Image (tube, helix red, strand yellow):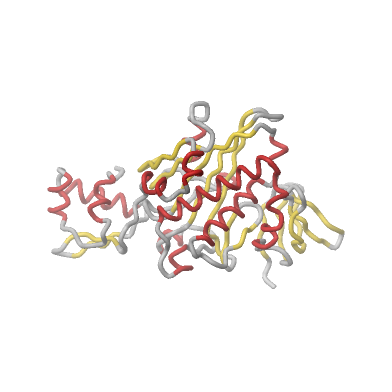
Amino acid sequence: MIPVPGLLDLLSSGATVSGADLARRLGISRAAVWKQIEALRAAGLPIQARAGEGYRLDRPLDRLDAAAIRRALPAAVRKGIGALEVHWKLDSTSSELLRRVEELPDRAFVFAEMQTAGRGRRGRHWVSPPASNLAFSCLKRFEQGYAALSGLSLAIGVSAARALQACGVEGVGVKWPNDLVSRDAKLAGILVELGGEFLGPCHAVIGVGINVHVPADARAAIAQPVTDLAELCGAAPSRNALAAALVEHLCTALDAFAVSGFAVFAADYARYDALRGRVLRVDDPRGAFEGVAMGVDARGALRVRTPGGERLVDSAEVSVRPQ
């Protein structure tokens, strides 16, 4: 059973609410309330049960609101958005865009409070409790072909880091090819999926996931160090304000990329580069090797200095080696 949003709305303040009151206000049985509470817990949302009192969330919820996100955008950006939707539950925001790619306009944004099959790079599952983090995808159409989109994930990483900085989040770096990190712990992931004609025109579905609140149980299910905005900032920024900042910066970045490609992001990427000068293990399709990161080339390929000379890497798994 997937919980209805109304239950979360009743618990969203963080106050304790009795099971009987929840059942009455939702028009369902107490047994149905209990089942929905258990489903939310299984999805990773921390809900406490107090004997004789009721249920409460560990923290107040900040639900996403499409109208609030739109209001927070500058007028020019608001006019340029093709669509902006907030869904309670989807399998994946990127899958939703891919299903509707023929009907949706350029710069369509889809957010979801809950993803049942959110995915990261190389088919990994994206772990995110309901209404806790920020998951969205954007559809962007390009007149050029696939080759002109080299470095797009890095440009998106730079724009996301700028948006976080505008929200008061400092110390965020871009880890090649598609993560945002703080002190080597993952804060966000980016997944770009291309479609259309190889030589153009084509489109990109850009999926972004930002950790805002990641409970301890959810962290334990992730096979790498992670952090979230609540940890970095003490108090996480409003999810609606964060969503608006990301939409604004992403629209600006995509317009610039469509005209000039990765070149206009190269200087900022060097500033946010979380790998430069560090010893890496690179799991390349041609075989694993180690070397020192030297930034990226004009296409966004990773430059790695090895004893045998510099190597360029277009796609690989990269991990920082202990010093």
Q: What percent of the width, then of the height, locates residue 87?
A: 38, 41
Count of residue discs: 0
Looking at the image, residue 23 sits to the left or right of residue 123; the answer is: left
Identify which residue, 220 or 79, lies in the foreground: 79
- Residue drawn at (69%, 35%), measured in percent from left and top? 146
Residue 313 lies, in percent from the top left, at: 75, 51
Judged left or right of residue 168, residue 64 is left
Quadrant where the image shows the N terminus: top left
Placement of the C terminus among the 4 image quadrants: bottom right
Residue drawn at point x = 49 percent, y = 50 percent: 126
Residue sitting at the far bottom: 323
Compare residues 133 and 266 and report the one nearer the observer.
266
Question: Where 226 falls versus 35 (above or below)?
Answer: below
**Which residue is rendered at x = 59% and y = 39% of the image?**
193
Residue 303: percent from left, percent from top: 77, 56
**Residue 312 shown left or right of residue 94 in the figure:** right
Outermost front residue: 75
Q: Where is residue 138 in the image (x, y as percent from the top left)?
A: 52, 41
- Which of the 4 quarters of the picture holds residue 318? bottom right
Rendered image quadrant of residue 281: bottom right
